[in-house]
Image (cartoon, rainbow, N blue to C red):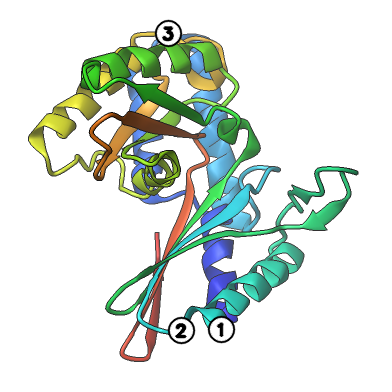
Amino acid sequence: MREHIVEAIRIAVTRIPDDVVEAIKEALRREDNEVAKFNLEMILKAIEIGRRDGIPVCQDTGTPIFFVKTNEPIDNLYREIIEGVKIATREVPLRPNALRVIDGKVVGNVPEVHFEPGNETKISILMKGGGSENCTALFTLTPGEGLEGLKRKIIEHVKSCGGKPCPPIIVGIGIASPAEKALILAKKALLRRIGERNENEKLARFEEELLKEINSLGIGPMGLGGRVTALDVKVEVETRHPASYIAGVAIQCWAHRRAFLEVKEGRVRIWQ
């Protein structure tokens, strides 16, 4: 399994998914700001070089985050993920992004792994850069504030982040409680393809409205102005406490690095 995990990580950091590339190209077609156009062209060039030469598209290869559904005992799979990340760090290579908090010593890469039961083994990998991760937020609203109150909070937050998360960004939102569930859900929301709307019509409209309002802020590519600040907004919901309306917000940079790995009837499939 570990060699497949290494390959999935390699694909994630060297190849930006086609739906994301197309969204960036569409942003370039819409753009009339010369600085924004230049930045989008440089982003597309970096993506092209990464794919052509098999090298990471960004110097920050991110923190590996794994969402795992499996019907197998998790101990062995967890060890395979840990070893796979170690090998990928050496061979791809990945930038060693895990430091000890107290003395700042580099310890390599430490994956964040979330397990849940499933009918088969499916692994979703998200490589999350530090700049965008610094714009992660948690909002605790009252139930009466609802989606409209949340929309105002998110607009204010994206505006305050400006160019820090390397726009054009993708915004993942998770509404649930307790709070840790909302944050995990926000990151899982980032795994959906660009343009894929929530199946719930109300949430789908919320995604579209929020995307339009974020793009009206004028932050633009790399925070230097322009029409397109966000490529998409994704919302996922689960249950909440009656007294709570908690939303986690996860922002991903333009280098949206994701990969999926599935084991079915003994065969392994990797895709983005």
Label 1 is placed on what type of residue? Asn
Determine the residue located farthest toward the front in the rendered image: 243
Res 103 seen here? yes
Drawn side of residue 30 relative to residue 109, left or right: left
**Which residue was labeled with disc 1?**
76
Q: Position of residue 137 (x, y in %)?
A: 49, 28
Q: Position of residue 39 (x, y in %)?
A: 55, 23
Q: Are marks 2 and 3 in contact (CB under 8 Å)?
A: no
Q: Are marks 2 and 1 in contact (CB under 8 Å)?
A: yes
Residue located 68% across and 43% down the image: 60
Determine the residue located farthest toward the left in the rendered image: 201
Residue located 73% across and 49% down the image: 97
Q: What kind of element bears circle 2? A: loop
Q: What kind of element bears circle 1? A: helix
N-terminal of the pair, mark 2 or mark 3, is 2
The answer to whether residue 212 is above or below residue 104 is: above
Neighbourhood count class around disc 3 (C-alpha, 10 Å): few under 14, some 14–19, many 20 upward:
some
Q: Nearer the viewer, mark 2 or mark 3?
A: 2
Q: Nearer the viewer, residue 57 or 252?
A: 252
Label 3 is placed on what type of residue? Gly
Measured in 3D between alpha carbons, the distance from the residue under mark 2 to the one under mark 3, in whole angstroms, is 49 Å
**Which residue was labeled with disc 3?**
218
Drawn side of residue 101 relative to residue 69, left or right: right
Q: What kind of element bears circle 3? A: loop
Tag on residue 73?
2
Q: Where, by quadrant of the figure, is residue 203 drawn?
A: top left
Q: Position of residue 267 (x, y in %)?
A: 37, 87
N-terminal of the pair, mark 1 or mark 3, is 1
